[in-house]
Image (spheres, coloured by chain):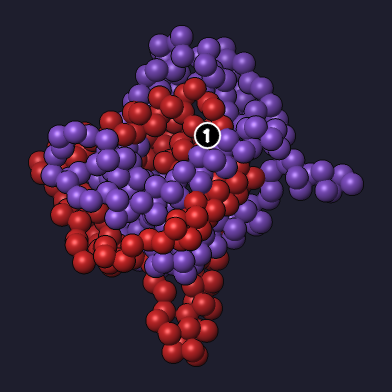
Amino acid sequence: MKNLPNIDGEVQTESANQKTSLKNIFLFFACGFFFGFVLVKAEVFSWYRIQEMFRFQSFHMYGVIGSAVVTGIVSTYIINLFKRRKQSASIHVAEKKFHKGIIPGGLIFGLGWGITGACPGPIFLQAGMGYAGAFILLLAALSGTFLYGLLRDRLPH
Amino acid sequence: MQLIHDVIFKPWPWYVVGPLIGLTVPLLLLIENKTLGISANLRHICAALLPSKPTFFQYNWKDHQWNLFFALGIVFAGVFVNVSGLMEYNFDIHPDLQKELAQYNVQLQAKAMPDFIFSTSALSSFTTWVLLIVGGLLVGFGTRYAGGCTSGHAIAGLSGLQWPSLVATITFMVGGIISANFILPYLLAL
């Protein structure tokens, strides 16, 4: 297993020598399609919905995120109950390690989110929907990540 | 009939879509023990495209191709919705937000995305470029600095009951509340 050379907010538990099969590649693509379609039905990609959220003008986004988290917790718990009965390995979300950078990083992301109304998932979705602005947004976000990679050693973590 | 029409063409309520989004977390874990996290793809794309790169991008991005295919699935969902014309949006923007945006002389339509930022013609406006570039840079920089975005921290991390993700989610919200209420108005007035 090869660790990522740098902090990525999570400890890599997946083994690199385990090649993703073609079947699983298709399944991941299908999951992404499902996820994206639900984001459309949820209007999560909508600039207006995000602006309403940050102005406390609508409960919608809080309901979406809140019920998503509750479902994530409960469904993982139930699956692990079955797994334990069958004595197979349980499933766990990758561990997120705390570092000081989470706070300034989170604030910086939040500042951007409040302007563009888009976190990375919706940017990919909007690009697929053909919004001209989304392509600029994607390029700018890639540049931001590149900039972080450049400055990383000089930032507190 | 109206109900069938609405289910196909209209947005769904939060208590339907929220749980569906949440199910993505165990789904990815069951397929191959993967944790939902979309912003990592920004790093993988940089690692794949850059000819000479800082150490942050020196790793085998192909080990993470599952996530790139996940993101590709999201892109195709967007293409599908666009091509099929399967979505009708309600013009239900909160009256206060409408009033606020009206100050900037922008036209609001019954769409999910405002034309004055995201349409092709909006690219002739200086304000649009500032919004997109400043916002995009902050999103790309901040998500990697924080080690995750809304999906990786707020949805997956909180589903795994991890306190660093709670810290991250709170800072996302604080940043968003500040910029939407106090910074965006200045940018829109440019």
Given the current orientation, which residue lies at the most extreme left position? A154
Task: Please tell me which residue is depicted at 31% across the width and 31% down the height of the picture.
Answer: B137
Q: Which residue is mark 1?
A: A128
The chain coloured red is A
Residue A24 location in percent, x, y? 46, 61
Indicate the quadrant where residue B18 lies. Answer: bottom right
Residue B189 location in percent, x, y? 44, 15
| Vertical side of B34 occupied by B143: above or below | above
Element class at badge 1 = helix
Residue B67 location in percent, x, y? 39, 52
Task: Please tell me which residue is depicted at 51% across the width and 64% down the height of the picture.
Answer: B27
| Vertical side of B170 occupied by B185: above or below | above
On what subunit does the disc labeled 1 rest?
A
Three-letter residue code for mark 1: Gly
| Vertical side of B112 occupied by A8: above or below | below
Residue A108 shows in this picture? no
The chain coloured purple is B
Q: Nearer the viewer, residue B74 or B135?
A: B74
Q: Residues within 10 Å of mark 1 (few under 14, many from 20)?
A: many
Residue A97 location in percent, x, y? 25, 62
Given the current orientation, which residue lies at the most extreme top position? B124
Which quadrant does the C terminus of chain B fall into? top left
| Residue B113 located left or right of residue B9 | left
| Residue A37 located left or right of residue B59 | right
Indicate the quadrant where residue B111 lies. Answer: top right
